[in-house]
C-alpha cells in the first residue's frame, strides 16, 4: 500500500511536539517535511523546538522556517484592545509560568533548518506534485495562506488540509475565538476559501477527548523513549494549566489536557477517531472586533455548502489511546 505523503506545519510547543512524534512514528505515512510558523512562541523558539524534537527522534526530516508574524493583523494598532485575552503567561511566586515553555526540555538542536523559506518550499513542492499532498496545519495558518495567496493554483495538488483550529462552542484565546485562528484570522479565512478540501478539528472536538495524569503515566509505562516523552508532555501540560487556572471543562478544578495537534495526525492515520464529521459552511471573522478570529459555522441546513469544508465535533478517546499505544510502542 502506497504511503500517504504529507507536510506538517507547526508552531512547536507542547502538543505540536506530540504531533511530530506521531507523524514520525506512523510508518504508514510519508512525512515529506516540517514547516514552522510563529504561534505558541516567537519563530526562533518554535523553530528551535521543532529541531529539538526531530533531533530527539533521530530522523532525517527537512525542517523549513516560515513566517515570523501574521499576515496583517499586527498592522492595526490596538486591534486587541476590545477583547479579553486568556492569560497564557503569569508570574506565580516570582516565576514566569507559560502555557508553553520557551524551549522544550530536550538538548539544544545541533541540526539546522533548510535554507529555503517554508513558503517557497510549499510553492515549489505543491506546484510539481505528481501525487496530491496532504497538509496538516496545527498552528496559525500564515505559511499556508501566504503560499495560497502567491499561487492559488497549488490548491489543486492539495489532497486535504487538516487543520487544528477554531472553536464553535469551545474557545480559549478570547470569548469567541481559538488561539490559532485568533493569531492570524485573515490567514484562516484564506485557507478555508482556497478551494481545497479542508477538515477542521476545532476545540469542540479536541477537548472532547481529555487526558489525565493516569493516561500520561499509562503512555510512559510503554517504555520507549518516545512514549516516555509523550507522556511527560501531557503531564507537564496538565501542571501548567493547573498553575495558570485554565481548564478544558466547566470545572476549574479539572486536571486534564487535550492533545489537540496530535489528533490531526492521528485522524489522517485513522479517520475513525472522529465520531461526528459534518460538511459545513464556514467563515472566519477578521473584523478586528470582539469576534476577531471566530470560526463561524452556518448551521442552517437549507443553505448551500459550496466549499468542501468538514468540521469534527467529537473524538473517540479509547480509539485514540489504542492508536497511541501502538504508535509509541514501535
Image (tube, grey):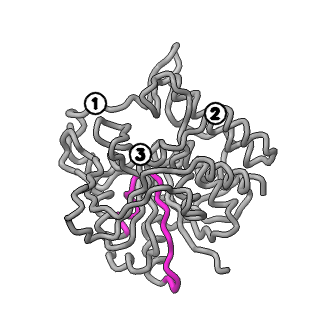
Q: Which percent across, then down, holds residue 31?
A: 61, 67
User: Where does label 3 land, which residue?
Assistant: 204
Looking at the rendering, the stretch of residues picked out in magenta corresponds to 129-147
From the viewer's side, name the closer residue of 146 and 221.
221
Badge 2 marks a residue whose secondary structure is helix
Q: Work out which quarter of the rendered image holds the C terminus and state it.
A: bottom right
> Which of pointers 3 and 2 lies earlier in the amino acid sequence?
3
The tag on residue 93 is none
Choose the circle earlier in sequence order: 3 or 1. 1
Q: Is residue 62 left or right of residue 86?
A: right
Q: Which residue is mark 2?
A: 235
**Residue drawn 63% across the image and 71% down it:** 30
How far, Cα to Cα, is label 3 from label 1? 20 Å
Q: Is residue 74 above or below residue 275?
A: above
Dot 2: within a 10 Å radius of its alpha carbon, few (fewer than 14), some, or many (20 or more) residues? many
Quadrant the N terminus occupies: bottom right
Residue with the mark numbered 1: 84
Give the Cα separation between the discs numbered 1 and 2. Answer: 28 Å
Q: Percent x, y for residue 242?
A: 53, 24
Label 1 or label 2, whichever comes before in sequence order: 1
The reply to whether discs 3 and 2 touch (Cβ–Cβ < 8 Å) is: no
Q: Seen from this angle, which residue lies furthest top? A: 93
Q: Nearer the viewer, mark 3 or mark 2?
A: 3
Amino acid at each position: 500500500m502506497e504511503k500517504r505523503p504529507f507536510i506538517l506545519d507547526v508552531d512547536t510547543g507542547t502538543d505540536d511536539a506530540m504531533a511530530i512524534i506521531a507523524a514520525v512514528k506512523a510508518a504508514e505515512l510519508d512525512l515529506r517535511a516540517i514547516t514552522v510558523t510563529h504561534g505558541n512562541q516567537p519563530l526562533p523558539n518554535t523553530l528551535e523546538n521543532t529541531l529539538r524534537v526531530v533531533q530527539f527522534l533521530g530522523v532525517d526530516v527537512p525542517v523549513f522556517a516560515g513566517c515570523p508574524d501574521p499576515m496583517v493583523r499586527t498592522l492595526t494598532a490596538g486591534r486587541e484592545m476590545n477583547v479579553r485575552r486568556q492569560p497564557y503567561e503569569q508570574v506565580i511566586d516570582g516565576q514566569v509560568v507559560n502555557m508553553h515553555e520557551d524551549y522544550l526540555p530536550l538538548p539544544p538542536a545541533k541540526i539546522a533548518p533548510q535554507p529555503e523559506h517554508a513558503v517557497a518550499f510549499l510553492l515549489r513542492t505543491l506546484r510539481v506534485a505528481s501525487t496530491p499532498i496532504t497538509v496538516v496545519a496545527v498552528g496559525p495558518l500564515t505559511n499556508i495562506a501566504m503560499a495560497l495567496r502567491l499561487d492559488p493554483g497549488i490548491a489543486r495538488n492539495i489532497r486535504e488540509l487538516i487543520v487544528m483550529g477554531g472553536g464553535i462552542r469551545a474557545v480559549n484565546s478570547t470569548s469567541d475565538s481559538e488561539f490559532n485562528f485568533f493569531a492570524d484570522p485573515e490567514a484562516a479565512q484564506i485557507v478555508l476559501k482556497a478551494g481545497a478540501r479542508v477538515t477542521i478539528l476545532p476545540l469542540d472536538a479536541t477537548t472532547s477527548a481529555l487526558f489525565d495524569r493516569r493516561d500520561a503515566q499509562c503512555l510512559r509505562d510503554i517504555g520507549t523513549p518516545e512514549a516516555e516523552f509523550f507522556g511527560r508532555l501531557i503531564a507537564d501540560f496538565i501542571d501548567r494549566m493547573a498553575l495558570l487556572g485554565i481548564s478544558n471543562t466547566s470545572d476549574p478544578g479539572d486536571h486534564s489536557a487535550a492533545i489537540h495537534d496530535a489528533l490531526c495526525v492521528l485522524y489522517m492515520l485513522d479517520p475513525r477517531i472522529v465520531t461526528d464529521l459534518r460538511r459545513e459552511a464556514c467563515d472566519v471573522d477578521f473584523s478586528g472586533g470582539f469576534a476577531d478570529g471566530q470560526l463561524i459555522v452556518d448551521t442552517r441546513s437549507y443553505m448551500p455548502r459550496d466549499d468542501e469544508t468538514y468540521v469534527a465535533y467529537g473524538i473517540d478517546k479509547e480509539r485514540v489511546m489504542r492508536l497511541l499505544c501502538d504508535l509509541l510502542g514501535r
